[in-house]
Amino acid sequence: MSEKSHSELDQELAHALAGERAHTLPTILLIADIERGETFVEAGFSTIWDYLRRVHRQSDTMIHYRVTCARAVNRFPQVIEFLRDGRLCMTTLAELMKIMNESNCDALLAEALGKSKRDAEKIVAREKPKAVPKDVTRTVAPTFPGKWTPELPASAPAAQQPVQTEVLTESLARKHMTIDREYEELLKAAHAALSHKMPGAAELDIIKEGFRAIIKQDEKRKGSSTSPARTRSPPTVTSRNRFSASYGSATKVNASGRRKMVESAVPPIAFNSITNKTAERAGSALRKT
C-alpha cells in the first residue's frame, strides 16, 4: 500500500489523466487524417475498420468511438478544442454524432459540454425519439431429459445477470433484466397487498410504491436517530407537594424544581383539618344548590 498522502496521489492522478487526454486527441486526429486521405487502401485494406483491427489490434468498441470521433473532427472541426480541454469526451461525442448536422452542431455541443454519455443519450432520444414498445416477456426454453439439446453455459443467478438500459425518449427508458421465480412470487404478493389501495396497478407502479416505502422507512429511521433526547420537565409547584407528611417539617419545591427541607408553618394535623373543612364547605354548597 502506498504511503503517499491523498494530496500527492490526487496530483499524480490529475497528471495521468491529463496525459491520457493528451494522447487520446492525437490518436483521433491521426485516424481522421487516415480516414480523410483513405491511406489505409495503400496498405491493402478496404475499410479503416479492418485496418485498425488487424494492424493495430484495436477492439471493436475502441474502433467505434475513435473512428466516429475522427469523422466528427473532419466534419465539425470545432469539436477539437472541446476534446483537447476535456469538456467533451469520446463517448459523448460519438453519441451526439447520431443526430448532429451542420445546422444543430453548435447548439448540441453547447448543451452536451461536461455531460456524460447517458445525458447525451437523453439528448439524442429527445431529438430522435424511439417508439415505446409493449411489454415483452421472454421465457427460456427448458431442456427435457432424454432429448438431445445443445450444451448451454451454466446460467448465473438472476441478480448477477447484466441489466441493460435503452433510452427511448427524453423521459422514458427501457430496462432489459433477468428475473427469477422469487421475483414473480414477490410481485404477485405485492400486487395482492396493494389491490385495495392501487387496484389494477401496473408492475412499474408496484415497484415504485416499494421504493417509496423503503425511502420513507429510511427517512423515519434517520429522523429517530437524530432527534434530541427528551428532557424531563421540573415538577409543578402546587399546594399538594409543598408539604410532606412528616410532622414539623415540609419539603418546599421552588420554581427550578429543587427540593428543600424547611420548617412547616402549619403542622400536618392542622393542614389536614383545613383541607377537611374546605371539603365540607364545598359539599354543603353543592347540597344547597
Image (tube, helix red, strand yellow):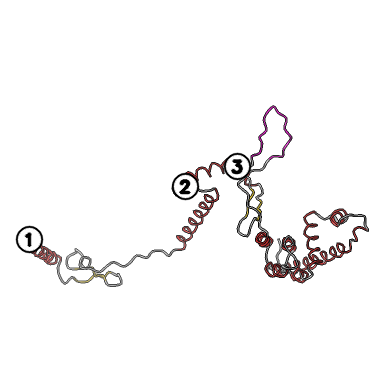
Residue 231 among magenta residues: no
For label 3, the residue is 180
Q: Is residue 184 above or below residue 251?
A: above
Q: Give residue 4's quadrant in the image.
A: bottom right
Where does the C terminus fall, quadrant-wise?
bottom left
Q: CA distance from mark 2 to mark 1?
A: 64 Å
How many residues crowd mark 2 within 10 Å: few (<14), some (14–19), many (20+)? few
Q: CA distance from mark 1 to mark 3?
A: 80 Å
Q: Residue furthest left?
A: 288
Question: In x, y percent, where is residue 2?
Answer: 71, 63
- Could you tell which of marks 2 and 3 lies nearer the N-terminus? 3
- Could you tell which of marks 2 and 1 lies nearer the N-terminus? 2
Principal SS element in the magenta part?
loop
Report the span colored magenta. 139-154
- The residue type indicated by label 2 comes to Pro
How many residues crowd mark 3 within 10 Å: few (<14), some (14–19), many (20+)? few
For label 1, the residue is 287
Count of numbered tags: 3
Q: Of the numbered discs in the image, which one, if any, rests on residue 42?
A: none
Residue found at x 79% / y 70%: 77
Residue found at x 60% / y 42%: 180
In the foreground, 114 or 214: 114
Say which element carries label 2.
loop
Q: Give residue 110's quadrant in the image.
A: bottom right
Q: Is residue 140 above or below residue 112?
A: above
- The residue type indicated by label 1 comes to Arg
For label 2, the residue is 199
